[in-house]
Amino acid sequence: MAIALPSWEDTAGSSRPDSLWRLMETLAPPVVAVVVAHDPGPWFEETLASLASQDYAELSVLVLDAGSADDLTARVAAVLPSAYVRRFDDNRGFGATVDEVQSMVAGADYFLLCHDDVALFPDAVHLMVEEAFRSNAGIASPKVVSWDDPERLVHVGMTVDKGGSVIDRVQPHEIDHGQHDAVRDVFVAPGGVTLVRADLFVELGGYDPAIVAMGEDLDLCWRAQVAGARVIVVPDARVRHREELASGARPIDPALVTPEGSDPPANPVTLQELQRRHELLAVLKCYGPFHLVRVLPQVALLAVGEVIVAASAGNRARARAVIGAWRWNLARLSVIRRQRKELKSHRRIGDKEIRLLQLGGSARLSAYGRRVFQHGFHGAHADELAAADDSERFAAEVGAATAADLAFGGAGAAGGTAAAAVGRPGPPTDRPAPGRLSGRVRLTAWLVAAAIVLIGTRGVLTGRLPVVGQFVPFPSWSATFAQFGAGWHPSGVGTTAPVTPALALSGLVGTVLLGGMGLAQKVMIFACVPLGAWGVVRLLRPFGSQRASLVAGLAYLAMALPYDALSQGRWGALVVYAAAPWVLTQLCRATGLAPFAAVHDPGTAGASPGGPTGMLAPYDRRRLSAWLARHPTARRVCVLGLLEAVLVSFVPAAAVVVVLTAAALLASSVVYGEWRAVGRALGVALGATAVAAAICAPWVIGTLAAGRGAVAVFGVAVPASEAPSWGSLLRFAVGPIGASPLAWGFALAAVVPLVLARGERFRWSGRLWAVALVFWFAAWATGRGWTGGLAVDPMVLLGPAAAAIASAIGLGVAAFEEDLRAADFGWRQLVSVVATGAVVLGGVPTLVSALPGRWDLPVNDFSQSVAWMYAKTASGSFRVLWLGDPRSLNQGSWSAGDGLAYATSEDGGPDARWLWNAAGPGPAAELESAVDLARSGRTDQLGRMLAPSGVRYVVLLTSLAPEITGEQTPESYPVPADLAPALGRQLDLSQVVTGTGITVYDNADWVPQRAELPAKSAAVQAAAPGVLGGPPGASVVPGAVPVLPGPAASRSYRGTLSVGTVLAAVAPSGRWALTGPGGSPAPRSSWLGWAAKYQVTNPGVGVLRFDGGAVAPVSLVVSILTWLVVIAALADRRPRVPGWRRRRGAARGDGPPDGGVDGPTGAPVDGRVPEAPGVVP
Amino acid sequence: MTDDDRSGSTVDVGDGPDAPTPPLRSRRSSRSGPHPVAGRWASLAVVAAVVVAVAVVEAVAPAPAPAPAPGTGGAVAVAPAGAYSSSAFCTSGIGTAATAAIYLTNSTPRPVLGTMSSIGPAAATGTVPVVRRSLSVPPLATLAVDPGGGLPAGDNASSFAFAGGGVVATQVVSGPNGWSTAPCATQTSPQWSFAGGSTSAGNSLTLSLFNPTATQSVVNVSFLTPSGVVSPQQYQGLTVPGGQLVVENVGDFVQNAPEIATLVSAQAGALVSSEFQQHSSGATGGVSLRLGAPALSPTWRFAQTTATPGSTVQFTLGNPGAGPVTATFSFGLSSGSVVPRRLVVAPQSVADFSVTGTGGLPQQTPYSVTVTATGPIVVGRSVQAASAAAPPVWGSSSGTVTVAEHWLVPGPGSSGVPGTAGAAVESLAVANPGSTAARVQVERAGTTTPATVFTVPPDGVTVLGGKQVGGLEVLVVSASQPVTVEEDSGPSGAPGVVSSTGFPFVG
């Protein structure tokens, strides 16, 4: 409904003789100032007064009351009686409310769209109109200055990058010296006060009503430019702006972001998220098809990177905002498509010209890079976390569940990102803490370390990863997933034992990486190194010394252990290397001892009645997460249990590591007491192991079903003669790298805190030493075979020892800073200097090993030596029996005694599906028995014994990879000396490949895995092939021909059959069914006790299929559900409270809401821990 | 007084286990340096103790060394009774010059089933006749089989597959010139060595190459002569198809060599090799069937050597190495001692050592001979009896590299089926290479005859005569420590003309 407004003459008239309106009354176009107000504060009168004081004659004022609690009419009338007030029952947001003006106002040439917290200088309107006329602009924006300090600039127009990220043209708190006082085109006229041509506004349909806040100005300006209108800034026109909403002073109305009739979301929509979604909306809406296709993938890629970085920095609000933005827009694609169509009808300017007004590259990325460089990784995020905290606190205070995370609102409608990006004053700190380093120093140190690691790894990162040890290629991601849920595994001769969740987790990583399993493998392998270093940094953070954390992390990175593991393909050792610091952290926290005493789980803080519950949203008490929040120990058990579940999936021996770590901590109580506290860690470790077992229940049950042999899942013994020496263990030099006396430096430096440290630093260094000693000894004893069947790889056991020693080194630094800070110069300082030198020297061997670029990882592998096998499947599917040291085999193996291991694969070399074989070999144990017979001279027809299992080739490995003179000298892994001669004596085995480290024997007696005996063959009755069945070279099942072809490890084979008997050497026979021609099942009978014979009575196409029954799917569902339940229970938590906030809270006397040592900037400022809430040194 | 003590005036900052670090500390106390910390010395002591203790333990009890590679031993051994399968491979290469019989001896108290596959000379069409038959070796008894049965006359070879262990095969060849006995191989090998053949006038030497495996072997054959190594072109890359026999007349390429050593080396695959020597010395002579040694060795043992009047006992040493080898002959007697003798063998050459031509060695007294060389060699022994002795007057045999506590010693035939007319065991020598006396028991398998128990002195030898061991029964020797044995059979012109060492086994 159009309304007629009272004329300016009638209301203001000649009351202001100094104004120019009389001069312009015949020329000036009518302007309607539209003020959208919603519960404005006491400043509102000043806003109205500023409008009343305008020197522009043709100005009318329309106040739109967007559902204020109290009617504003009286307030408006008191200041601006001529203004028209329109009251709405609800608040639909600024844009949607302004849009009403299209139907309410007629005859206006310009709309002046105003917030309710602005104050215009008297000449602002006329200057803007004048310049808009002069420049023929569609939209004009004034210079926006601070409400309280007009000398400080807030906005002078804004620009945008191609991804829609809005960047302010001024720095925060920039003083106005007239440096921006030129009229110029800008991309965005920031909200607050915007002059827009009325016809343009109507043509564009006004603001997008879906944009309730944060971004309506970007959207309008972009569309205006598409329609051919200029957007300019008029610096001479000045406006003061409080930015109540963007600064977070005023919460956003929950009704705006909560669909009608629905409950408030668990994670309230933040201004940041609003801004991000509207930026993306503008991109999706305003680009033409060509540029959209070009730009959108880049925006998506940046979003993924931003989510990863934000999540890793603990800035979950930002990660959630980015994800939420995409989710919101993707859900509105139909609306966006319609809007694009509408905008297309107005398009007069191409994207190419519009792009000229945009910034190149990614403004957000550039700003982030600058911040990281200036403040370090954590410092770069601290501001946002601080802002998030502020908003969180504010939200709690006002009781608004939807108001949180106002980090990006400070710069106005769209400028928040820029404001956050260019940096704000850092988080408040009480005083400089000892051990604090500048972000630049830390960043430089980590960059140098990363560069060295990358240099050392360059040859592998860019090339093919050789198949050595456990570095085995994965099949496709779908095959990896499928194997997890198959219910049958090709391990040995086949088993129904559930497989480890590692396959599913690997598949998950591959899925995230768009199916690139090769990349997934590299990521999962090489990420272990930085992950471990990061873990050590986190472990030491409660001690409050960034320098200590840095040194510890670098020391951990400099140890030879991970690179030795890399060079020998020991993925398990790498995984434990990565996880050991995190496990140690959890257990240290579980003790509740200082400085870990103050570390409460963020999820529990709000649950404490005496805690600052008002700062965090309450839990739904009906949920498991709520229960966990009330039981911090149980929560910690679950956290560690989940971590342990992931670990044991890849490295079952990790269960031993977790429990042994806790036991080592307990053992340290002999010296340091605190039995009860440290005993709690053991309890948590045991509980976590139980949780991990529950999470991996199907696999664990399957493993336990192996009986006594289940212990083999932890590892297969290597010859005692191969045991690493005590000295090499102490130096973490258990491979080709680090075998230098210099590597003693780490252990030497780790002694320093035992000598110098005091208080908690001393006690924890002692406990860390206990961990190191226990694991060193365990590795030493295990290597010598003193632990019986429990044969954990010593390299795996070295992970926790290395983490402990690196942490002790860091505590030495902390001790130097804290305990020697004011001491007289003497031997103690000298010791510290020597220790520093020792650490540096200790890293030299690793540094030197980095130069070649491969960490001694071989280039050539044995997979190339057996690649020809795949071509042999033409004559039937077969198995390969692998014999050798367990470290040389590329799959999970079982012990054959004397340090010999055996394993199988199908149709050639193994892939990652064989990496985690079942704990027990099952019927494949017969293969080991046969080999044992050969070794002891009790058979010379080994091939005949292996033949029923489909073993066509026997591969004997005696080194990690082929030795190539001048190119690679891989680790040698000798096998029992009697093995090769024994194999050589076999009448039915002949050598077909003989190289350095590998010998391949061809079994002349082999039988295809799936073979058919025509009815005419008399050998059908052969119950079990015996030695008297024929001379060497004669098949143990004469007349057998291969049938039912199919890929390796398949669960279904299809092929043409003739009348006769089909032999299928896949176990367990009871779970495989042959469907003959016509769909009828072929009668089955047992063969060899574990394989099956099927009688085929009609020729035709048959299918041999695994039928797992209900067990497999039930097992799969249980497994998935268990994982999801635990993850959900732990993930459903409120935002983390950054460390600086806890410190600040403590400083305010609020008490540490969550202990305050887990944030990005570390512990309480001086590394000490308050003894009681609210008491800070 | 320590630094710590000097800070006595400072406040107690509570470094005990339960005391938290104080929030503030006086400047004075800070400058005084660290205070005594409870547990510091204990911590350092524990760390040092553990590190040192483990180091000491490691030094005292180092990690075990890798298990040594098993000795290749001889080509014969008794498969364990509980074996899944065992084999025997017999090849003679005698052509039509002699007849052969194979004796299968079962040392177990149960019958052992087996199959025998015999191949004959290839026909003109290239086809190889094969005869397969099943057999059952009775417990603790000897079964005689004819390797040539069903095959055309000529060279043949047999392989036996037994469904179990405990069975060994010996072969006896007999012809106009004499007779000989040799064990059949129980394993294949890529290498075989012989010492002591001759192609000089009156002598004929054939080399049998039998490949019982499924895949072909490619073989190189070389000969060591006193003048160096001979590698006939035709014997390089010699192909022996799987399951076939190749017999070569050495004299065709190495002519008129009085002493040679033969080296068979397979480039690919494995095989069994034996040599058949026909020796003529005037009106009489002898034959010798010898299974090769699957590996060279620096030590060779002969349990019984007896120099009788008019006889010649000669050892032939072949050194295939690139450097000279010094061989030491040690002699073990039942009592007394003899000074060892030394002999240098030139590289890639053969050398003879005649005990009968060496002064200071006992006559008509059996003694053991141990040849210890500075490098791997092969050693053989030949015995030329006095011309007036009963035929055969010549024979040769291989030594053994094996010492064992248990030996199975089949006789030259079985009851009712002697290897040759009147063949019987005449003596059994047990040599003890150890430094302590060995208690030895000899019993006849499958009979109720009481066992003979005696003691062999250190580095000594004890010889049982025909009264104790005579006949054709299978002898089982058990000793308290590793010994070597040698059985001498008759009829022959002198001890050592027809002899064999038996089969070591695990008791």
Image (tube, grey):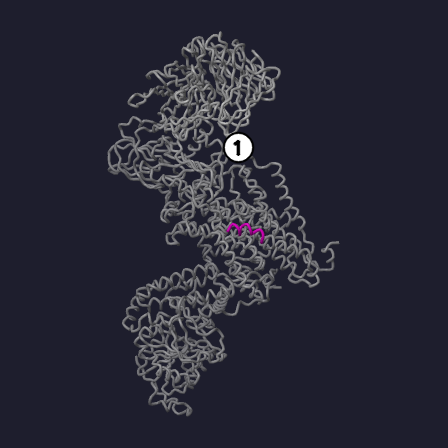
Counting from the top left corner in percent of width and height, residue B10 is at 72, 60
Counting from the top left corner in percent of width and height, residue A221 is at 36, 74
Above or below, A305 relative to A991: below
| Residue B356 within the magenta-colored segment of the rendering | no
Counting from the top left corner in percent of width and height, residue B74 is at 48, 23
Quarter in which the C terminus of chain A is drawn = bottom right
Q: Which residue is drawn at 74% across and 57% down?
A: B6
| Residue A842 within the magenta-colored segment of the rendering | yes
Counting from the top left corner in percent of width and height, residue A220 is at 35, 73
Q: Nearer the viewer, residue B154 or B320?
A: B320
Q: Nearer the viewer, residue A853 or A420?
A: A853
Element on which disc 1 rests? loop
Q: How many labels does the image show?
A: 1
Q: In this view, does A883 lie to the left or right of A1056?
A: right
Residue farthest toward the right in the current orientation of the protein: B1
The residue under label 1 is B67
Q: Mark 1 lies on which chain?
A: B
Q: Can residue A273 be seen in this view?
A: yes
The magenta region covers A840-850
